[in-house]
Amino acid sequence: MHLSGQTPLFRARNLEKYLGVESIYLKLEGSNPTGHKNDRIAEALARYALSRGYSKILIYGSEHYIKSVVYFAKHFGLECHIAFTNKRLISKQFKEDPLIQWTRINIDKIDDDIEWLEKYAYENEMFLLSEWEKKPFIRSLAIQEMMEETVARVNSPTDIWTQIKGGYTAKSIYHELMRSWIKGNIETMPSIHCGTSPKLDLDEEFIDTSRSQVQTISEKSLHDATKLLKKLENVTISPSEAYSIAAMLECKDLAPGTHIVFLNDGKSDISINEISKNKQLDIEHLVANTRKLLEPYHDSVEETTDAVMKAIQSGFIFTATRKDEIQGICIIVNMGFETFIPTYHLAYIGVKSGNAGRGVATELINRAVDKTDGKLSLHVDIPNKRAKKLYEKMGFVHCYDRMLYKG
């Protein structure tokens, strides 16, 4: 079970109207565990280190990269060592963590660091995870998975918008699109557009191998794009990660069709909260909200109350809220089994109308899977094809038909 990925694909309807485009989807990578696309790569690298038999890793990179790798390394029980130079201060965020050790290196140029770090890691039986030592194969697989998730939702995109620093993201997107096209999952190859810094010097080989159109973006355009996205869609993104959306906004002649925009740390205004341990819960209000959100598939008051009480006692309840108003709910009950059937059952999940394509159900299900460690089942009404399709994309499979005794 992956801890990262399956991020929301957000339908940006207000942005569509603003630009006069048929459809725009925002891939919100800020919904990953530490809030960045890096999490996909960090998880893949941590798993790879484990598969190679390592118990210790040496981490070197930016603060966010370190944060991401540490998160997954701890989850898999890897001992973390963070390398730093005299010119790089130790972040307070990691300084007091007893599970992290520090390694001072005496070289201040990144180009020279890698060789030194590789030698140090080898001598100390560590696996090196450097932000600038690419391990392109592993990174490419993580990015290709992001594109695969997207094509599963939108099977005929016309344009892809991303940002580039090292170039492996655009190449990986292109390779996954080519694979999907060869397999017949998409009818035509979309155009790939890359926003980048004027300081980045890209070679012709990159342009050729990724079939990308590259656009340099100014600092002002980044800040303008950030503000517009917040105003129109209530999606938050940092200016340093806004190259993809800025490139789209600066394009003078947007093609008709479906546009996909990858936002490395983009987040919606929806927050997911676990409320089952709140002693101040208003049970009647919670039951009424659950039944209302599940229309026309809701059960009786007695049945819903029974499930809610069971979830409070030994399960979980999650709500999706926007400005303190409930937009979705997820009720999970503990079935009491270890292996006979999944330990947990997703009794109810409902989303308020008007949230279609905004990733609310996806985020609730992701949280449910993470909380139950994937030991989860659910029931879906046979006529509800839309829900069944979503569950299948998120890893659920049809195992058997449920039959109830009615006398």
Image: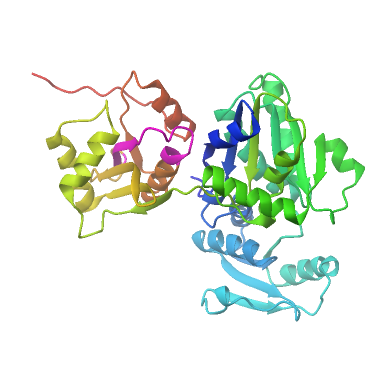
Horizontal side of 150 relative to 256 (left or right) equals: left
Q: Give the quarter of the image for residue 240.
A: bottom right
Nearest the eye: 259 or 232 = 232
**Is residue 385 shown to the viewer in this render?**
yes
Q: Is residue 108 above or below residue 138?
A: below
Q: Give the quarter of the image for residue 210.
A: top right
Q: Position of residue 134 (x, y in %)?
A: 75, 54
Q: Quadrant of the C terminus?
A: top left
Q: Is residue 344 magenta?
A: yes
**Is residue 5 shown to the viewer in this render?**
no
Nearest the eye: 30 or 172 = 30
Horizontal side of 260 relative to 373 (left or right) equals: right
Q: Is residue 23 magenta?
A: no
Q: Which residues are magenta?
A: 342-362
Q: What's the image's color scheme?
A: rainbow
Q: Give the quarter of the image for residue 148.
A: top right
Name of the residue lying farthest toward the left: 407
Q: Position of residue 393 (x, y in %)?
A: 49, 31
Residue at point 42%, 36% (across, down): 355
Horizontal side of 38 relative to 384 (left or right) equals: right
Residue at point 36%, 53% (across, down): 273
Q: Position of residue 304 (x, y in %)?
A: 18, 38
Q: Position of residue 168 (x, y in %)?
A: 76, 46
